[in-house]
Amino acid sequence: MFHDKETFKKAYLERLISMHGKGLEETTPADQYYTLGMMVREYVSRNWIATNNQYQVKDTKQVYYLSLEFLLGKLLKSYLINLNIRTVCEEGFQELGLDLEKIEAEEPDAGLGNGGLGRLAADFLDSMAALHYPGHGMGIRYRYGLFEQKIIDGYQVEIPDYWLREGNVWEVRKSDKTVEVRFGGEVITKEMGDTLSFDHVKYEPVLAVPYDMPVIGYHNKTVNSLRLWNAESAIKDYDFDHMHNRHYHQMIEYKKSTESISEFLYPDDSTFDGKRLRLKQQYFLVSASLQTILARYKRQHEDIAHMPEKIAIHTNDTHPVLAIPELMRLLMDQEGLGWEEAWDITTKTISYTNHTILSEALECWAIEVMAPLLPRIFMIIEEINERYCQKLWDQYPGEWEKIRRMAIISDGYVRMAPLAIIGCHSVNGVSALHSTILVEDLMKEFYEEEPDKFNNKTNGITHRRWLIGANPGLTNVITDVIGAGWKSSPSQLKRLISYKNDAALQQSVAKVKLENKEKLAALIWRDYGIKVDTSSIFDVHIKRIHAYKRQLLNVFHIMNLYKRVKENPDISITPRTFIFGGKAAPGYHLAKSIVKLIHTIAEVINHDPSIRDQIKVVFIRNYGVSHAESIIPAADVSEQISTASKEASGTGNMKFMMNGALTIGTLDGANIEIAQKVGDDHIFLFGLRPDEVLDYYQHGGYHARDMYNRDKRIRVILDQLMNGTFVKEDVDFKSIYYSLIDYDEYFVLKDFPSYVDAQQTVEQSYQHTASWYEKSIVNIAHSGAFSSDQTISRYAKEIWDLEPLRVQ
Ligand SMILES: *Cc1c(COP(=O)(O)O)cnc(C)c1O
């Protein structure tokens, strides 16, 4: 049906009518989107089945990527690109008087993630399918994704994101694959000869019903799966007949509480939120997934001991790390294995990625929360802990402190990172720096025990979405110069290096950039009524709002620049458009004040005629994947200015680089590797180095108040937060002021002078158009190294021991 334009048009019109009972003229864009989506899903169904069949027949090893977050964004466009049918659809639609881009925009973003961690999971799925890897995602089908951000009077207001309102055209409910997950109750231990058996009784059953979505490979026949679990009550209709009133109400309560498990995504990716429901979500995902994986294995294999040769299970951060005790439980209680054998299989099967060193994000659960909710799982964790501590005790007799630091259970808490490290065969960080910090600092003592477990896998991004999909103009320019080979082998982007000084290429890249800026400027005008100058520097800072990501540093630079221009009416700066976007966690007051501050300064600066439009500040509301796709191709400057050592990797940095923006950044996360690739002349580095930051944390020696006293610019800026220069109403930026002057945990004031200098360099460099675009081309050329294809092949070879399988 996608073979050629004519067949497509005919098939599409027929489907439109049969699905909606109306002719083309009466259908809405939503109808039109849904119909195309259904056709695409049908179109891939044959390959979807073939993929699964071939994995089974060839008995190939498969990986399951467990994640509490998949930040998928929209899928239609990616699918059309990967299936190589987008041109047919576009042309067919044109003749029908339809606009494909508009129809693609109808799809709601699947916002089942907070930020980088969730987007990484989505990019990884895309790469696994593109590279023919047998790999699937497993997650939760949250009815509400990450909240929708509204701005009222400059304040963030959160609205529930009911992304499923119009249904999800990509999902297929598989009721027959439902499994039961058990919460609460008691464990009865029975002696049977010389073995023990464990009966879980009086538990509350919850049904996990799978919804599968296809994950479509790029120009190949692979269609992997993303399985999202929906929580449902296990009440059979007939149960109600036997209930008198009191029980009936209990039933309703039970139904509500079970369904709440897949109701909301927790809207915080950087602080550990000790909610019981969150723990329920984690176990729900893990138990449903592992039961399914084990049952699949057993359908084909007799000997459970060989499971690690056929199955790899990856846990994205510690959120799904209950996979370790859950697999132990299944192997022992259900399969009848002994501890040692079960432990051997478990550790060989499971691997784990750490995503952060922020201490507030290291998960731990109070025993009084976990033990009653997951009694058998808690018993197993206790046993893992006891055995491990015993081993340590034999090795380090008397070193109580060391053992306490390394124990899984201590001070009344179950600590998930130690559980992950002890119970799996691979622990990886997500950039060279981050992995080094793990082994030298956060996980040092574990590293000394088992150094071979630890490795680095620098994050990556899919160039199919972030370049081919998001930036067709640049895609064509690149292809004109080096051919199309880079689309399937992104490392070929390096061939651009030899053209970096080619004036024609520089001009083409500049022209595309301008077109993308014009598109974004139009959007900004439409949605915000702000006129931005497309010859100004588009300086972009989009990511979650968090103190460590230092939106404040950027804001202070703007305040400083504004003051300079205002006080010197004759100076001309290179005009700048500062673009922000990002959500603050609803309970994170400082981050929400930062959102308000950005709006406050924007209001003043955008309406001050005396600065002659040389500075504009725009806050793009409700930042998500789709916004990223339209903003990043239009960026000249990429703000990657986290406090060194705090951003584990970053992936936003890679998306900008791939779209030819130049980075202003700290030596943090993957910025370091970007700098190594492009060379120091092609990136604007500033600020404290990670070792300096870590040294300050350890030994002290930094006093923020000195910065305030010594640097007049800082004094003015901080005073302006309090004295009403920007603040017309009764707004309170005291919390920002005191967070800096009292402690400045993230070295905002410390790095300010060096940041201002680096921004000065940016401005001067932008004047030299040819050399600016030379830099831009060098960045694009090296970005292939950050394709998630590279990352995934390393996971496959070095962690999962996974071979690709070409679906025929
Ligand atoms: C890439 C991406 C992120 C991660 O950005 P960082 O700059 O690495 O924090 C967050 N949200 C969305 C929507 C993204 O696309």
Image (cartoon, helix red, strand yellow):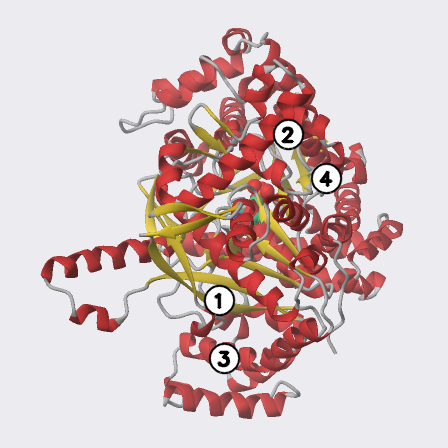
The residue beneath circle 4 is: 456
User: Dot 1, how many residues are within 10 Å of its Cα: few (below 14), some (14-19), or many (20+)?
Assistant: some
- Image quarter of residue 134: bottom right
Q: Which of marks 3 and 1 is in front?
A: 3
Look at the numbered discs 3 and 1 and tell me whether their residues touch, using CB distance below 8 Å.
Answer: no
**Amino acid type, label 1:** Ala
* For discs 1 and 2, the disc positioned in front in the rendered view: 1
Say which quadrant the N terminus sits in.
bottom right
Numbered label attached to residue 38: 3
Question: For mark 2, what is the residue?
Answer: 759
What residue sits 40% from the left and 44% below the top?
A: 374
Q: Which amino acid does label 2 sit on?
A: Gln
Which residue is at the front of the view, 549 or 634?
549
Q: Residue 105 carries which label?
A: 1
Q: Dots 4 and 1: beta carbons under 8 Å?
A: no
Asked where in the image residue 373 lies, by quadrant, the reply is top left
Q: Which residue lies furthest to the front in this view?
A: 193
Locate residue 374 relative to residue 674 in the image: left or right: left
Foreground mark, 4 or 3, reads: 4
Tag 3 near tag 2, CB within 8 Å: no
In the image: residue 548, left or right of residue 494: left
Image coordinates for residue 557, horizontal then vertical, percent: 54, 27
> Label 2: few (<14), some or many (≥20) within 10 Å?
some
Image coords of residue 12 (percent x, y): 52, 87
